[in-house]
């Protein structure tokens, strides 16, 4: 009799536990059908006004229209974007908090910081790639013409480490390290804290070369103060017509670009991730949105969540290998 009561009680307890578990899962399932029913927060781990922030505000405006819900941009800058990224990694995966991630947060920082506070693979699911930001190798040197990567390599080999190159960012340092290794061009890198400083020095004649974003470089190219030797994307970009990729100038398969993408905390319901991804795709297909992104220095490129996850895996391997081999450090 006691045994029967024991098993009956145990079955009742197990049944209650199962009901609790089912109830816990039922909440997000029910919520998915009405998502989004309140404002969506996208954390940008950079200061307001920076490129990533401008990009997300442009995209956020389009998403708020198509989703019929407010997109709230929250800037959480600091520690090389680690603070904001770690915040999202620890956020509830309920479909109302997302991250604007970059090549820094998801490909470089784990190799630059001893403890960034998050794992780019274990803590996030990809939502959608938004776009690429190729870098430009530019010069004021009179004997280096537009699309003159071949001439640059020849000069570097003839006089090793005699040509200084301004490097205003970690991405510029990674481009530089990979170019020196791939092209066997012994150049000398000079690190700067910001684009304005390196641009001032190259325009003032203190250094002959600089590696920077399209946004920072394009006004000087248009004004005839700089010449573009090459762009770091694998293919030419409509943002800089007539400028050839480094890969087409004697350095096969060369490609190092920055990028921006949306990520969700790991465990966010796939239905919500997929729905948001589809809305990002629609936004990027709009001609006016595309024009605005190109003006801001971003080459629109959509990838689905699964495609983005595979892309990030490859990027981590690439960036990690370059950072380790070249001993690139945050200063």
Image: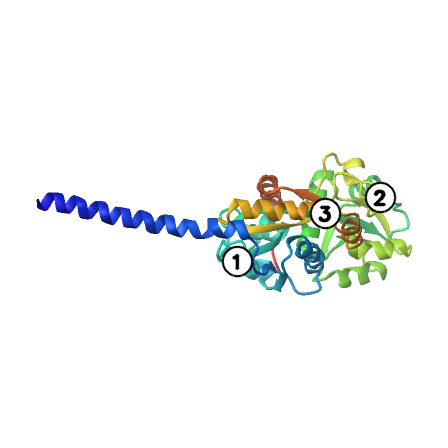
Marks 1 and 3: which is nearer the front?
A: 3
Residue 323: % across, % down: 61, 48
Q: Marks 3 and 2, how far apart in space?
A: 24 Å
Looking at the rendered image, the quarter that the N terminus falls into is top left
Residue lying at 68% horizontally and 65% vertically, measured from the top left: 48
Mark 3 highlights which residue?
284
Q: Distance from label 1 to label 2 (Cα)?
A: 38 Å
Q: Residues within 10 Å of mark 3 (few under 14, many from 20)?
A: many
Q: Residue at x 79, y 57 (%)?
A: 216
Give whichever of 243, 327 is nearer the camera. 243
| Rendered residue at 61%/39% (across/down) | 307
- Residue contact between numbered discs 1 and 2, judged by CB atoms under 8 Å: no
Q: Quick one: label 1, few (<14), some, or many (20+) residues within 10 Å?
A: many
**In the image, residue 77 lies at what x, y percent?**
61, 64
**Residue 83, horizontal then vertical, whole percent:** 55, 61
Residue occupied by mark 1: 86
Task: Quickly name the residue at label 2.
Answer: 243
Left or right side of 133 for 240: right
Left or right: where 111 falls relative to 48: left
Mark 1 and mark 3 in contact? Answer it, CB < 8 Å. Answer: no
Q: Is residue 189 left or right of residue 43?
A: right
Is residue 323 in view from this perspective?
no
Q: Earlier in the sequence, mark 1 or mark 2?
A: 1
Q: Quadrant of the C terminus?
A: bottom right
Give the mark toward the camera: 3 or 2.
3
**Nearest to N terminus: mark 1 or mark 3:** 1
Helix, strand or loop at label 3? It is: helix
Q: Earlier in the sequence, mark 3 or mark 2?
A: 2
Residue 81 placement: quadrant: bottom right
């Amino acid at each position: 009799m006691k045994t029967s009561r024991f098993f009956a009680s145990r079955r009742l307890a197990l049944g209650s536990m199962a009901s609790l578990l089912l109830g816990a899962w039922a909440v997000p399932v029910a919520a998915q059908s009405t998502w989004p029913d309140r404002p969506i927060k996208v954390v940008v781990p950079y200061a307001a006004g920076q490129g990533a922030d401008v990009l997300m505000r442009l995209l956020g405006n389009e998403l708020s229209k198509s989703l019929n819900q407010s997109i709230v941009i929250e800037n959480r800058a600091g520690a090389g974007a680690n603070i904001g990224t770690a915040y999202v990694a620890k956020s509830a995966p309920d479909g109302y908090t997302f991250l604007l991630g970059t090549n820094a947060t998801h490909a470089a920082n784990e190799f630059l910081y001893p403890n960034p506070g998050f794992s780019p693979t274990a803590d996030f699911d990809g939502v959608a790639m938004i776009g690429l930001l190729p870098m430009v190798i530019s010069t004021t040197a009179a004997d280096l013409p537009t699309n003159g990567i071949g001439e640059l390599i020849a000069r570097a080999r003839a006089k090793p480490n005699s040509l200084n190159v301004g490097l205003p960012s970690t991405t510029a340092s990674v481009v530089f390290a990979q170019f020196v290794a791939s092209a066997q061009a012994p150049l000398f890198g000079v690190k700067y804290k910001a684009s304005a400083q390196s641009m001032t020095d190259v325009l003032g004649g203190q250094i002959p070369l600089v590696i920077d974003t399209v946004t920072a470089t394009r006004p000087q190219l248009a004004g005839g103060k700089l010449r573009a030797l090459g762009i770091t994307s694998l293919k030419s970009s409509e943002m800089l017509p007539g400028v050839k990729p480094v890969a087409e100038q004697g350095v096969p398969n060369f490609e190092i670009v920055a990028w921006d993408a949306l990520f969700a905390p790991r465990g966010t319901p796939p239905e919500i991730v997929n729905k948001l991804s589809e809305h990002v795709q629609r936004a990027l297909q709009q001609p006016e949105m595309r024009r605005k992104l190109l003006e801001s220095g971003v080459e629109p490129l959509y990838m689905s969540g699964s495609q983005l996850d595979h892309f990030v895996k490859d990027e981590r391997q690439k960036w990690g290998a370059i950072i380790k081999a070249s001993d690139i450090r945050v200063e």
